[in-house]
Amino acid sequence: MQQLVLKSSSNKIKSGVVGLDALIGGGLRPHTVNVVYGNPGCGKSTFAWQFVAAAGDNPSLYISLEQSLNEIIRETRSLGINTFEKKVKDRILHFHHAIIKDSEMNAGEVSMNFLMRELPHHIDALRQEAEHYEGGLRIAIDPLTPLLFEVDGLNQLRGILGRIFMNLRSIGTTVVTLEKGFDDVLARLPLYLGDSVFELDYLGLGGALSRTVQIRKMRGSAHSEKPHPITFETGKGLLVRNFD
Ligand SMILES: Nc1ncnc2c1ncn2[C@@H]1O[C@H](COP(=O)(O)OP(=O)(O)OP(=O)(O)O)[C@@H](O)[C@H]1O
Ligand SMILES: [Mg+2]
């Protein structure tokens, strides 16, 4: 049987996860929204940290809807992804923590308020800067999930997510993380609206297939169609173990 040849393209955006780009034709497509989907502790946030850490000297935008900057710095330090901390200090990584500041708002309302009202302003402010870089800025949103519980109807959420994703695509290449395990169709809508889906699985059984990544979708590109083992390694973070 003829083997699938994954053509590589030079204008792809490196994911920052060692071994992954070889499975998706060289990297993420520029100006897309890419969903990292998985169960608790599978490495979703680590993927997002690595993605922005791989921006080199280019500016990037990180939106945390959950963990504080101090928590992220502590965790990236323990994984040896030190460039995350340095980029924040050097102000080339724009970090925003959308958290509950007044007790009137729940996590969903805070997320909605940030993504619908504040994010467009940040995007406009960064638009000119983004044009200087191929593929625009690297953007991460971790996790997108709280927003999904704030909206009642599928059509309303589709409209809201469509606008957010269109805005993000206009200035760069985005990784959003999405928590798995909610049966609600609303909680899975980003999988349909995203340009690619990386499903991370963590079985917690030890062994080579305890942690895996599978590419569920990659619009406009050939990709590997099977699960690949992944591990955590100090200094590299999350990495794909073999390329077979
Ligand atoms: N230095 C390390 N060595 C090995 N494994 C590690 C190391 N640091 C983190 N991990 C693993 O990574 C997990 C956390 O990764 P991460 O925070 O990226 O997952 P997540 O999918 O975002 O989790 P959550 O659902 O809580 O948001 C830990 O539970 C642990 O299993
Ligand atoms: Mg996380």
Image (tube, grey):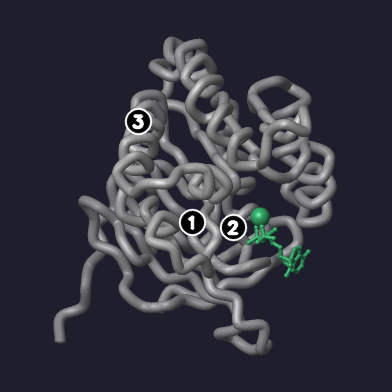
Amino acid on which disc 2 is placed: Lys
Depth check, front residue: 134 or 124 = 124
Residue 22 drawn above or below residue 68: below
Q: What's the residue at 29%, 43% (across, down)?
A: 155
Image disc number at residue 163: 3
**Are the residues tagged 3 and 1 within 8 Å (C-beta)?**
no
Spatial CA span between label 2 and label 3: 23 Å
Cα separation, mark 3 vs mark 1, equals 19 Å
Residue behind mark 2: 44
Q: Is residue 155 left or right of residue 71?
A: left
Query: Relative to residue 24, is residue 157 depicted above or below?
Result: above
The answer to whether the beta carbon of the residue marked 2 is less than 8 Å from any atom of ligand 1 is yes
The quarter in which the N terminus is drawn is bottom left
Question: Disc 1 marks which amino acid?
Answer: Val
Above or below, 26 relative to 227: above
Hey, which quadrant is residue 98 in on the image? top right
The residue under the point 63% across, 53% down is 45
> How far across and how far down the image is residue 54, in percent?
57, 41
Ligand number 2: quarter of image: bottom right
Horizontal and vertical percent for residue 53? Answer: 62, 40
User: Mark 1 or mark 3, which is nearer the start of the sequence?
Assistant: 1
Q: Nearer the viewer, mark 3 or mark 1?
A: 3
Which of disc 3 and disc 2 is earlier in sequence?
2
- Between residue 219 and residue 162, name the one nearer to us: 162
Residue at image location 32% in from the left, 70% down from the top: 224
Q: Please determine whether, in this image, residue 3 is positioned above or below residue 68.
A: below
Label 1 and label 2: CA atoms lie apart by: 6 Å
- Could you tell me if residue 46 is visible in this image? yes
| Residue at the spot of label 1 | 36
The crowd level at tag 3 (other Cα within 10 Å; few <14, some 14-19, many 20+) is some
